[in-house]
Amino acid sequence: MPPIYLDHAATTPLDRRVREAMEPYLTDVFGNPSSIHRQGQQARMAVDGSRETVAWMLGAAATEIVFTGGGTEADNAAIYGVAWANRDRGRHIVTSAIEHEAVLEASAYLESQHDFEVSRVMPGSEGIVSVADIEAALRPDTVLVSVMYANNEIGTIQPVGDIGLLCRSRGVLFHVDAVQAVGTIPVDVGRDTIDLLSLSAHKFYGPKGVGALYVRSGIHWWPSQLGGGQERRRRSGTENVAGIVGMAKALSLACESMDETSTRIVELRNHLIEAACSAVPEIGLNGDPDRRLPGNANLRFPGVQGESMVTALDTLGIMVSTGSACASGSVEPSHVLRALGDSNAEARSAVRVTIGRQNTREEVDSAVRSIVEVYRRLRDSGVARPGMLQPVAASR
Ligand code: PLP
């Protein structure tokens, strides 16, 4: 049996049609979009056309899209940009305890180095942040709320529309890390009352190292990358033309088939969860069963360490993860599962299975058989129990 890739929250394969769209910009049309000759202007047209496409897919205006080098850069730019520009109004930021490190670390940096205060709102046990808790955290000096659209580990979808309305009514800027949501579920910055939004192409079958930040027109925000003044002075640096073209193509393909793809993936995901949980009753699902991304099944395997499951499954050709790609390889328990109330041992016993658009029912069935077999073997052998791990230095 060929290997089965079930780690689409970490990254997705490049769509063949996206590669074809990018190809001319890696070869013949190599100009710098800032050059005024025809090579440059061809590249400029490609970048501007891609900007129109990305904007249209998000319900934004083209002038509100700033291309970046991925999701992390977009998150950092949003947080530093709002904090710096508005620091005379206040130095308080509200975020959630289950954000991606790109948001958590950027806000922690402002806290430790620049006298900001950060309130990290805890989610409920199902992994959803409540609007009332965000409201309770707001203060007169709050300048920014940053809450993700959907969580990268457990896939739970946050009430961003309601949080957006709350922030607008209080005059607080609202940033959404939508890296896991864009291209997977419908996202509309107007409907959800969002001021800044981050996305990343490699999560929706586009290339790695390219993303975008939506910045609502008229908001007070400062760029953090300075230089040649590209992107209307909002993100200096020569544009990644092929990457930008690929991202726009990938996003339009993803949005075109979103309904159909998500129905099929939800069926596969529900089948996987039911099959695994009914084969071994101790296996459970982390996070809200319904308000979650179509492809996400974050499963817990009591008494067994998630890393051991991932390694053993890899030897059988099944590629899954323990959670966020950035944290894997470390034995630190997931900060997301800890925030849901899990003990360290419980938080280390999770495996994230994320289904993509190329997966089949046969692959899911085969993966479930391997998951169940590996779990029984590890559990019964008594090795690799989470409690056996050495505690690591509390670096975050
Ligand atoms: N935010 C979320 C929710 C993510 O899942 C990721 C990547 O896993 C990022 C931000 C970072 O995006 P990138 O890999 O493009 O830097």
Image: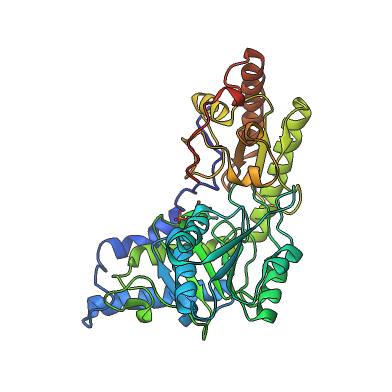
Q: Residue at 45% across / 69% down in the picture? A: 80
Residue 230 in picture, x, y percent from top left: 32, 77
Q: Residue at 51% across / 54% down in the picture? A: 203
Residue 5 in picture, x, y percent from top left: 53, 38
Q: Residue at 66% across / 30% down in the picture? A: 368
The residue sitting at the left extreme is 37
In-front residue for pair 379/166: 166
Tell me: 287 left or right of 86: right
Residue 212 visible to an observer of this rendering: no
Residue 366 visible to an observer of this rendering: yes
Q: Looking at the image, is 353 positioned above or below residue 130?
A: above
Instruction: Name the quadrant containing residue 45.
Output: bottom left
Tell me: 125 left or right of 195: right
Instruction: Name the quadrant containing residue 173.
Output: bottom right
Q: Looking at the image, is 261 positioned above or below residue 221?
A: above
In-front residue for pair 366/130: 130
Residue 25 in picture, x, y percent from top left: 31, 65
Residue 257 in picture, x, y percent from top left: 61, 60
- What is the tally of numbered marks visible in this picture? 0
In-front residue for pair 274/176: 176
In-front residue for pair 236/249: 236
